[in-house]
Amino acid sequence: MLKNNFVDLSKRQNGFTLIELMIGSTISLILLLMIGTVFVSSRQAFRVQEDNARIQENGRFALEILGRSIKQAGLADIPFTGFKVAFSGDAITGTDGGAGVPDTLTLQYDGVIGDRDCDGDPVGVAGTIVQGHFNIDTVNAQLRCAGSIAVAPVAPGAPPSGAVLVENVEDLQILYGIDTTGDQSANQYVDFPADWDQVVTARVCVLIRSENTNIASAGNSYLDCNGAVVAVPADGRLRRAFSATFNLRNRVNILP
């Protein structure tokens, strides 16, 4: 009787066959593959969104810095005593880099006690001129600014020079709006004005790239600061051009 019970119990302890194990393993591998694919896709989408947000932030910040300086250019600190009716420096000058080469921009205004140049140096003596020279470090993709505070600022050096303001900036292109009729409104935009005193506006464009590589898919393209369609380079970085037009407020006294 005990022997029969043992035999019956052993017959009820059935395991998995080899085929069942193989099927189960295959299903598990398929599930892991699906989960991994979803994870990789989600991670890539997150990287694209994160880099797009950084590009947007850098573009806005670069235009904010440049726009604030352009609006301040030519400011004359008129004293309560003495005789002064206009700014004595060069409010705006620059260079045209040409096709595919970044421009430079040099801006000046009268500094007052408490002001700082783009390097962070403070104005210690009233009546001195604050100068900011904006340029691009093309090797490291940086927007830089070399500042100086002096009665007669020195000529800015060749780029790259100055403190780093914004990272991942590949290009800086500027068109100058000139007033040839005296109505304080830009009649045309040029790469390099014959008379800097006619400049009343500046149209600025910066090209920002993503921090990470291999984000943009092959075959995609973007618009550069010249409006040309450019294929995404081999580094796979996202790129976007930001542009804005700013008035030189100290040359325009009939703003709407």
Image (cartoon, helix red, strand yellow):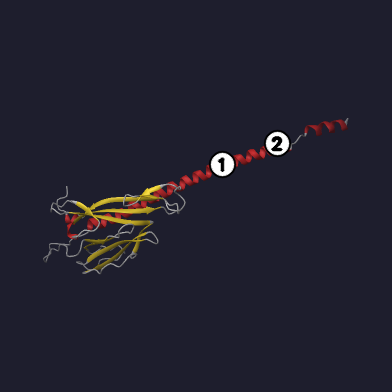
Residue 40 visible in this rendered orientation of the protein: yes
Amino acid at pointer 2: Glu
Q: Nearer the viewer, residue 111 or 49?
A: 49
Q: Secondary structure at mark 1?
A: helix
Amino acid at pointer 1: Ile
Compared with 107, 1 (above or below) is above
Q: Nearer the viewer, residue 177 or 18?
A: 177
- For image coordinates 30% across by 53% down, the residue present is 205
Q: Nearer the viewer, residue 101 or 123?
A: 101
- Would residue 213 appear left or right of 13 to someone viewing this image? left
| Whether label 1 touches label 2, CB < 8 Å | no
Looking at the rendering, which quadrant does residue 97 occupy?
A: bottom left
Crowding at dot 2, Cα within 10 Å, few <14 / some 14-19 / many 20+, comes out as few
To which residue does mark 2 refer?
20
Q: Number of marks in the image? A: 2
- For image coordinates 56% across by 41% down, the residue present is 35
The N terminus lies in quadrant: top right
To which residue does mark 1 refer?
35
